[in-house]
Image (spheres, grey):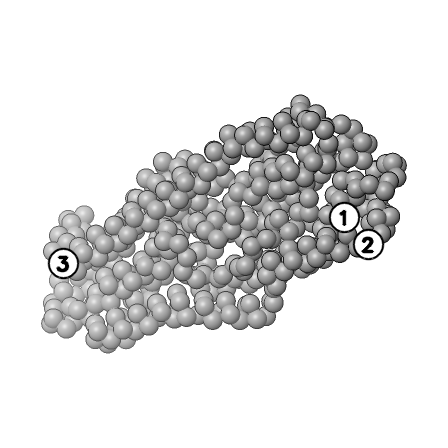
Amino acid sequence: MTLFLHELRLLLRQRLTLFALALLALLTIAALAAGLAEVARQRAAIAAIPAAQAEDIGAIAAWVDQKKDAGSAAYYSFHPTWDAPSPLAFAALGMRDVAPYILRVRALGLEAQIYDGDTFNPELALPGRFDFAFVLVFLAPLFVIALFHDLVSGEREAGRQRTLEALPGGGAALWRRRTLLRLVLLWAVLALPFAIAAAIEGVAPFTVLLVLAVIAAYLLFWIALAALVGRLRWSSVANAATLAAAWLVLVLIVPTLANVLINQAVPVNQGAEIALAQREAVNRAWDIPREATMRRFYAAHPEWADSAPLGSEFHYKWYFAFHENGDASVADRVRAYRAGLEQRDAAGRALGWVLPSVGVQALLTRLADTDLAGQLAYQDRIRASHARLRNFYYGYLFRDRPFEKADFDRAPRFDPRIGGPAS
């Protein structure tokens, strides 16, 4: 213990070391504060939904109650869905930075509502929002390089290496002590602020311990790489340049190239194209004989086939039927789109077994439920809720039941715990 304390005093006398540790601590705290603030903002937006929803529905209900038209109620009523952030979301915001976490849907065609404005494909290990995952994956290796590039070469260049190795407790034991000390300090400035933020957010203890272990493992990888370069007995400047080049290749260049290759190997159209195709199918329905539309709808929903025949006037059940037919017309595209995204995601996760930077980022977003799987699960919950909404309104539309003001309170509400299979 005395030797460790002595090494600590020597280490803390080095201005570069103190500056590096302080800077990393500040970046970590800033990233955690930014993540906590963003998660708090999202939770506040979700908490404001009930009041806004009650106001909207109140205005619609007062108007619909005059004619008691179920079609108008279904057409004009928006129903909120939301994806509440997990306790660990503050550390790795992932797709919550680019994908909607609140979506208000109507009982009309769903696919256009889900994919409207979807102009992105999930990227693989590219820099995103400044959060804890960003600091750990992209910035922490630079601080490892700063503290370890001259661990041995600096002593050799100063003419102290042979003397240090000849002292009692010197040699390999000395380098192990210095390596362990630097590792503990780097781990502490990352792990302690994270642990405090995780305690504030109520993250499960096992998850916290797992993230702390991931931090240590990722730092050890870069320390091992620095030790490997140090064994080449190059100068400190050459070591630093080599390690910086390795960081550039392993953290930025290779993941970016891999992203391009995966995108080319697994072509995926934009989700906005699904929305456009669904809208085109809906628009074409105005020119299709209404009997043909209803036959197609009743084939998929025989439970409503005994509904009264359409007259010559407009009826909302025909309108909602061709909206659902529009969803059915793009079902194959939706499945292909989802399968493509899942293939890309699987390829990225497989790459994570080779590239620690990709693997750590993928693991953190999975633990935080902010990855592609989390976003697709939210879409499944939207679809399950939308199916319940449709069935609710169909009970009025296809039985020509009046929709009264009190019926608005009977409409099924979104349950974030209930999921469903993809369409």
Residue 382 in percent (x, y) is at 62, 42
Label 3, residues with CA under 10 Å away: few <14, some 14-19, many ≥20: few
Q: Are marks 2 and 3 in contact (CB under 8 Å)?
A: no
State the residue in front, 306 or 17.
306
Identify which residue is drawn at 72% across, 28% down. 68
N-term-proximal mark, 2 vs 1? 2
Identify which residue is drawn at 36% across, 50% down. 132
Q: Which residue is mark 2?
A: 288
Residue 322: assigned label: 1
Identify which residue is drawn at 76% across, 27% down. 402
Q: How many marks?
A: 3
What amino acid does circle 2 point to?
Answer: Ile
Q: Are marks 2 and 1 in contact (CB under 8 Å)?
A: yes
What amino acid does circle 1 point to?
Answer: Phe
State the residue in front, 76 or 246.
76
374 over 360 or under it: above or below: above
- Separation of residues labelled 1 and 3 (CA atoms): 71 Å
State the residue in front, 223 or 86.
86
Residue 265 in percent (x, y) is at 59, 70
What amino acid does circle 3 point to?
Answer: Arg
Q: Which residue is mark 3?
A: 15
Single out the mark in the foreground, 1 or 3.
1
